[in-house]
Amino acid sequence: VRYQSLDRTAGSGPMGDGGMHDREFLPIREPRDRSLERSGGRERSLDRGMYLEDDLYGSRSARQSPNTHLASGGGYLGELQHQNNDLQRELANLKKELELTNQKLGSSMHSIKTFWSPELKKERALRKEESAKYSLINDQLKLLNSENQKQAMLVRQLEEELRLRMRGPSIEMQQQMEVLFAENEHLTREIAILRETIKELELRIETQKQTLQARDESIKKLLEMLQNKGVGGKMIEQLEDQTKKELEARLVESENLIRHYESIVRNRDQELNITKRELKATNETLRALQAQLEKAFHNQNLGGTTNSTLTAILETKDARIVTLEKEVNLLEQELDRLRECGIREPNLTSPLLQHPNPFNKAPLTHLSFKQQLDEYRGEIQRRDQEILAMSAKMKTLEEQHQDYQRHIAVLKESLCAKEEHYTMLQADVEELRQRLEEKNRHIEKKTQTAVQATQERNRINNELSELRDHMDIKDRKINVLQRKLELHGANQKLATGAAKAGEESSVLKKQVEEQKKQLEEQRRKIEEHRKGLDNRIKQVEEKEKYIADFELKLKKRKEKLDQQEAQLLKGGGTSGTDQEVIKKMEANLEAHRVELEKAREDAKHSQEEMERLLQLVQMSQ
């Protein structure tokens, strides 16, 4: 009897070279060299799941167990098919969730990219390439879904054919059922774990968005405060550099998350490839079993003596055969059934036994079965080696997972330390702002005093000009008085006699000479006072120049303080040096304050001198 379904599968070529098993996946491009180290760490979280699912799919290579019960076998394979479909749907849902998270990341980083667009064009190009990769992966998943459906149809056909051939109850089938149920539960647990990991990643992305928004708001506030205070463009450029670095770090973290999802997809693709290879192997083993059953059926009809030798060979097989033991047991049951049929009908087989050909063909069948058993043993050894390799891989992956957990703990600790350091820096910045406000108040007071001093100087200059005008008027009056005295003397000379004229003229001359001497002394004193006033005016002008220079120095000191504040905002590693610089600046400010006090005292002294001179001039009048 030939089976049409097996012939159809055999038509694709030996070892599954043709048909639907030809398809190979397009290679996914390797991630960028810049973040290879972090992507290796990110892939550790899925190593455990990959190993468990490899074990699950590896155990399916031994699932060639026909069900003896007609109703239960069909229902079981139907459940398996439904579970496979459910898993495929869940995989599609996970892919959709991955795409949604990528869209959310893109939307969250869009505003930042528009703000820093000239420097992030490369990142956009890489994101486009990654979207193209995801589209290729989706196409490959669609192809795999179609191939899985075809393979499910083939499995159903094979199950129906084997169900027609087998009748007796099987304990191994029940064991396989239990194993499959356990694997199904394991798959559900793994899917739940994957969902939880995706939720955790979404929460992390949301927290990162919130932190980015808070950072943007704080940066905007600082920029507004600095612009209001009149800080130059250097401070803004430094803040922009800080924000660029932080945003680049955030982008690197988002790229690592994307590579993490890519590793999940690659693991799923590898698992699907493994299932394809296992289905190929099962089809080949089914074809080999069909050929063996047909040979055994012909040999059973030809001679009954070969059955005992075949069963003896099958009963003495090695205990290490685990994956192919089920196929051999099925072959033994089929041969026993054929032998029983031959015993029940001895009349039909007796003329065939007298034929000499079965005795000649029995050694050939024995050798063929022996060769097949040797091949099975070699294949079992190969499978054992693969299991050992997978166990070693599992150990390494578990170690990697533990390393990843340690790395996460270290990262959490570093984040806590950075947050504490950030709070300390904020407190230092607040203190510096308070100090700057106090210094600004002192500077305003000093500027007010300087303005008052200039006003006093202007007032003194006005008074000096008035005094000069008064002195000119007094000189004119003195000249007029001298002329009047001369005229009066002349008149007295004419009125009096010659005797009295000599005496009176001598007396008048003496008085006039004394008055002239007094006037000369007053003029000399006035000249000295003028020279003193000129010197005082020069001193006041020098003080004004000194005050202007001092104001320029204060402005420079203010700019230096602003630069120090910018450096403190940029990095808090040099807090000790900044404190020393601040102390030096405070000492310089105190020295300048002392100089201002001296200047004020000199201005007061000059003002007192001016008042004294004014009093002297008034007394002279």
Image: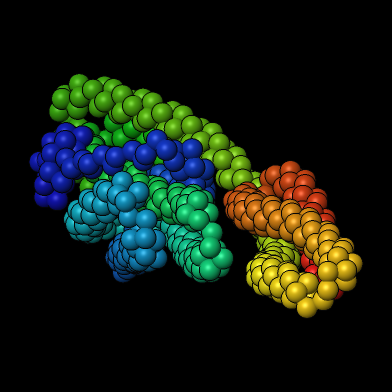
Residue 234 position, x and y percent, is 50, 51
The residue furthest bottom is: 495
Please state which of residues 308 and 533 is positioned toward the viewer in this rendering: 533
Q: Is residue 553 above or below residue 493?
A: above
- Left or right of 405: which side holds 336? left
Residue 399 position, x and y percent, is 60, 39
Q: Is residue 53 above or below residue 177?
A: above
Quadrant that contains the C terminus: bottom right
What residue is at 16 percent from the left and 24 percent from the top?
Answer: 356
Q: How is the image coloured?
A: rainbow
The residue furthest front is: 498
Please state which of residues 13 and 588 is positioned toward the viewer in this rendering: 588
Question: Would you identify the image quadrant in which residue 601 lies?
Answer: bottom right
Please state which of residues 433 and 498 is positioned toward the viewer in this rendering: 498
* Residue 585 shows in this picture: yes
Please state which of residues 111 and 413 is positioned toward the viewer in this rendering: 111
Residue 228 position, x and y percent, is 53, 68
Could you tell me how many numbered marks the image carries?
0
What residue is at 16 percent from the left and 35 percent from the top?
Answer: 17
- Left or right of 346: which side holds 462? right
What residue is at 86 percent from the left and 65 percent from the top?
Answer: 502
What residue is at 49 percent from the left and 42 percent from the top?
Answer: 38
Question: Would you identify the image quadrant in which residue 590 lies?
Answer: bottom right
* Residue 615 shows in this picture: no
Residue 379 position, x and y percent, is 37, 30
